[in-house]
Image: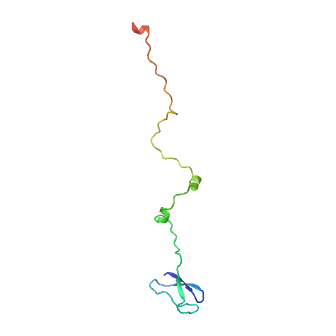
Amino acid sequence: MPTYVYACRACDSQYEVEQRITENSLTDCLRCEAKGTIKRVIQPVGVMFKGSGFHINDYNAKPSEAENSSSAPVTPPASAPETPTAATAPTPAPATAPTSTDSDSK
């Protein structure tokens, strides 16, 4: 059953009353018995969203740069083997042409 907060303008008191949703709001103060001096006070809802499946938890802002630097370093995912670049590739030896000798020509 919901709990509603009422405030009286005559005696400046606030109190909570458990009422069914279908019941009418109170109009007379329960403390000073003044007629038509109380109003229902809007209260914030005491709900905490924990776990997955809630928009506030699943789609919150991305972590800031400060939070990223404090966490463990991220390694890139394994991809195709890297090809050596010109700076790291070994230079091939110059090709030598076969020389003809006198024994080959005879």
Q: Residue furthest left?
A: 106
Query: What colour scheme has been applied to the protein in the rendered image?
Result: rainbow
Percent x, y of residue 93: 49, 24
Q: Is residue 18 above or below residue 44?
A: below
Q: Is residue 72 above or below residue 85?
A: below
* Residue 33, picture quadrant: bottom right
* Residue shown at the point (57%, 87%) measured from the top left: 9
Percent x, y of residue 26: 50, 88
Q: Is residue 46 above or below residue 39?
A: above
Percent x, y of residue 32: 58, 92
* Residue shown at the point (50%, 47%) measured from the top left: 76
Residue 74 left/right relative to 105: right
Percent x, y of residue 94: 48, 22
Q: How many marks?
A: 0
Quadrant (top left/top right/bottom left/bottom right) for the C terminus: top left
Q: Is residue 7 above or below residue 85?
A: below
The front one of 78 and 95 is 95
The front one of 31 and 49 is 31
